Image: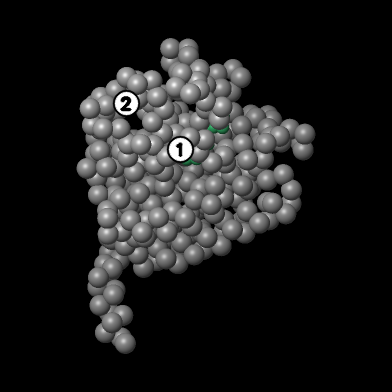
Amino acid sequence: MRQLAPTTPLLLLLPPSLPVPSVPPPTHLPSLRLRFRAHPCPWAHRALILLALAGVESSVRLEVVTPGLDGAWMSGDGSRLRDVYKRRKGGYEGRATVPMLWDEEREEVVCNESWEIVKFLSSIGGLDLWGEETREEIERWNGIVYPNVNNGVYRCGFAQSQEAYDSAVNDLFSTLDMLEAHLSTSRYLCGDSLTLADICLFTTLIRFDLVYHGLFKCSKKKLIEYPNLYAYTRDVYQIPKVAETCNFEAIMDGYYRILFPLNPGSIRPIMPSACQHEHLLQPHNRELLPSRSSREAQQLHAI
Ligand SMILES: N[C@@H](CCC(=O)N[C@@H](CS)C(=O)NCC(=O)O)C(=O)O
């Protein structure tokens, strides 16, 4: 099996290959097109949720790309994403990743880093998921969640040495334990309101028992063994329009059938029942948690 492992251990972990976008002026919005493969990819899923919540579909066109025979991303019209990237002025040498925001008028990549794309979509959609007051806290959570959880599962799945795996799996589960404790008193990562930090954690959690637990050897615990994290996942899932962005069949196909080196037989296991839509719709009761202000008042009172 070792020779079947990816030769580049960081295949899916590469840092953004393009600089952070200069957010285009509103006159360019109608020509923007978000290019990504809709469902399996957790990074693209972030943008898909923002697009749904922000209701900016009329300003930002969505294009779904799927893997061609050689695994490279292809558009519905048969063009390769790699060639689209190359059309940008100055060319492009990095990996042709999704999600990618493309300015059709200027033939330019606006951005191919999901964290920047969600901030951009949140701002043009007028959503308060990146509020001034909580920005520092959102960045702080993202700084913990990104390396240990979002990327952490990939570090486990693609580790090429026991040491690399041990380190990744320890980072992952110690962070999940810490999040479980934090979410026992806080409805969302930054308090009582949903923020971008939650969307970015959610797209990994919703895939956890479906694919990462087995395929990526994140096997110490399942998400359902974390009562607060599982309820938190259901809470986000039940936000109107979010469930529609989760396609479990496509996620399982994407990971088990396409990541050939990790699953040479391409056998797709049966879906865990706790990951099914009906289970995710069960009450989460997280609205009953005391609000942050009442908790803070209680703490002050206790001093
Ligand atoms: N840091 C990037 C990572 C995006 C990424 O790795 N996307 C994967 C799909 S899940 C991809 O397009 N990989 C193609 C490649 O590396 O050639 C982001 O968050 O947008």
Would you say residue 285 is visible in this rendering?
no
The x and y percentages for residue 22 are 35, 36
| Depth check, front residue: 54 or 19 | 19
- Name the residue nearer the viewer: 137 or 177: 137
Residue farthest front in this picture: 90
Q: For the view shown, which residue lies furthest in the top direction?
A: 77
Q: Label 2, on which residue?
A: 32
Q: Give residue 294's quadrant in the image.
A: bottom left
Residue at horizontal 42%, vertical 39%?
20
**Is 160 drawn above or below residue 297 in the view shown?**
above
Q: Which residue sits at x=30%, y=32%? A: 24
Q: Is residue 174 above or below residue 42?
A: below
Q: Secondary structure at mark 1?
A: loop
Residue labelled 1 has its Cβ within 8 Å of some atom of ligand 1: no
Q: Nearer the viewer, residue 156 or 56?
A: 56
Choose mark 2 or mark 1, whichever is in front. 1
x then y, percent, for residue 16: 50, 38
| Discs 2, 1 touching: Cβ within 8 Å | no
| Relative height, residue 154 to residue 230 (above, below) | above
Give amino acid for label 2: Leu
The residue that label 1 is drawn on is 19
Give the residue type at disc 1. Answer: Pro
Q: Give the number of the disc on residue 253.
A: none
